Image (cartoon, rainbow, N blue to C red):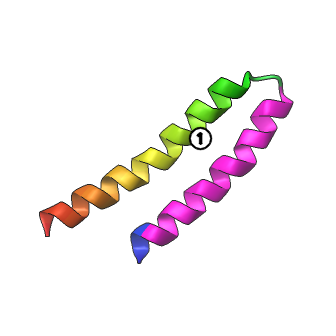
Amino acid sequence: MKAIALLLSVGMVAGLAGTYLAEAGVPLWVVGLAVLVVLAVPMVAAVRADRKR
């Protein structure tokens, strides 16, 4: 449950930051890559935590 909450909160932050980055003139592919990296970190951590149990 904690991992899902963390993932959702990070996703919301990434979505909001993505709009500001795009508005600032950052290319869309960079924004997309940044959002994917930010979302991948908690997902990988959650998968690793589940494997260790």
Left or right: where 45 falls relative to 15: left
Q: Residues within 10 Å of mark 1 (few under 14, many from 20)?
A: some
Q: Residue at x 85, y 32 (%)?
A: 23
Q: Position of residue 22 (x, y in %)?
A: 79, 32
Start-end of magenta stretch: 4-24
Left or right: where 38 falls relative to 17: left
Q: Position of residue 27 (x, y in %)?
A: 73, 21
Q: Is residue 37 above or below residue 26?
A: below
Q: Secondary structure at mark 1?
A: helix
Q: Is residue 33 above or below residue 4?
A: above
The kind of residue tagged 1 is: Val
The quadrant of the rendering that contains the N terminus is: bottom left
The quadrant of the rendering that contains the C terminus is: bottom left
Q: Position of residue 38 (x, y in %)?
A: 52, 44
* Residue 18 is inside the magenta segment: yes
Q: Position of residue 25 (x, y in %)?
A: 82, 23
Q: Which residue is mark 1?
A: 35
* Residue 41 is inside the magenta segment: no
Quarter residue 34 falls in: top right
